[in-house]
Amino acid sequence: EARQPQATAYDPRKRLWYQVGAAKPEPQSVGPYVAASTNTLTFSLVARLEADPTVVFGADVLIDNISAMLAEQAVSRNAKGYVFDGDGRLVVHSDPAVMEEIAKKLADGSSSSDKTITSDPVFPAVAALLRDKQGDQARLLGFVVGGENYVARLARLGTAEDAVDGGIAVIVAPLSDFTADSLHLLNQTLSVA
């Protein structure tokens, strides 16, 4: 059975994703925002057609999917993943409970700063790494939280020509996740000797 077209008031040219995409020849990132179609927190990656700048293509990336990927691809059993946007706002976290807290704040238009994410005791130290500009260095960084040593790797998302310029992904884990088994074996061996 053929469907009949329905009249609609939807005009993509009035949407922020279209306007951002049409404004520049380079691909752009829009968001995070609550998508009208899915009612979920989303980023849109948009680009205009070179031959006709009034044609804009967009792809939505659900923030929950990025969060789930960070959790599933964790480097160790206690690792945490974070994504900050170009303004330094935390927009993705690997822990679903923290992600729910972030999503509420972002949906309300408020910022997710280190003083407002209370359910992750490591987050203030991660935010401090970013504030101190230590993320500009391509190396592992160390810090201590609650007497436990952590390691972090920060990675810039994109280049000057890229859509997500300024964003930073951060993976952190307790150092003991990588050394505890070896230390236990070493202590066991030394106690036998």
Image (spheres, grey):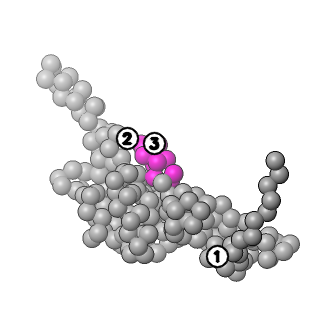
Q: Secondary structure at mark 3?
A: helix
Taking depth in this image into account, of 126 and 111 the one nearest to the observer is 111
* Depicted 42 relative to depicted 173: above or below: below
Query: Which residue carries the number 1 mark?
Result: 15
Our reading of the magenta stretch's main secondary structure is helix
Taking depth in this image into account, of 119 and 131 the one nearest to the observer is 119
> Percent from the top left, x then y, of residue 94?
40, 51
Q: Earlier in the sequence, mark 1 or mark 2?
A: 1
Residue found at x 44% / y 59%: 92
- Disc 1 versus disc 3: distance between alpha carbons? 33 Å
> Percent from the top left, x then y, of residue 24?
71, 78
Contact flag, marks 1 and 2 (Cβ < 8 Å): no
- State whether residue 138 appears in this view: no
Depth check, mark 1 against mark 2: the one in front is 1
Quarter of the rendering occupied by the C terminus: top left
Residue found at x 39% / y 57%: 99
Contact flag, marks 3 and 2 (Cβ < 8 Å): no
Amino acid type at mark 2:
Ser
Amino acid type at mark 3:
Glu
> How busy is the neighbourhood of tag 3: few (under 14 within 10 Å), some, or many (20 plus)?
few
Query: Which residue carries the number 3 mark?
Result: 72
Query: Which residue carries the number 2 mark?
Result: 76
Amino acid type at mark 1:
Arg
* Depicted 167 relative to depicted 147: above or below: below
Which region is colored magenta? 65-75
Depth check, mark 1 against mark 3: the one in front is 1
Q: Earlier in the sequence, mark 1 or mark 3?
A: 1
Q: Secondary structure at mark 2?
A: loop
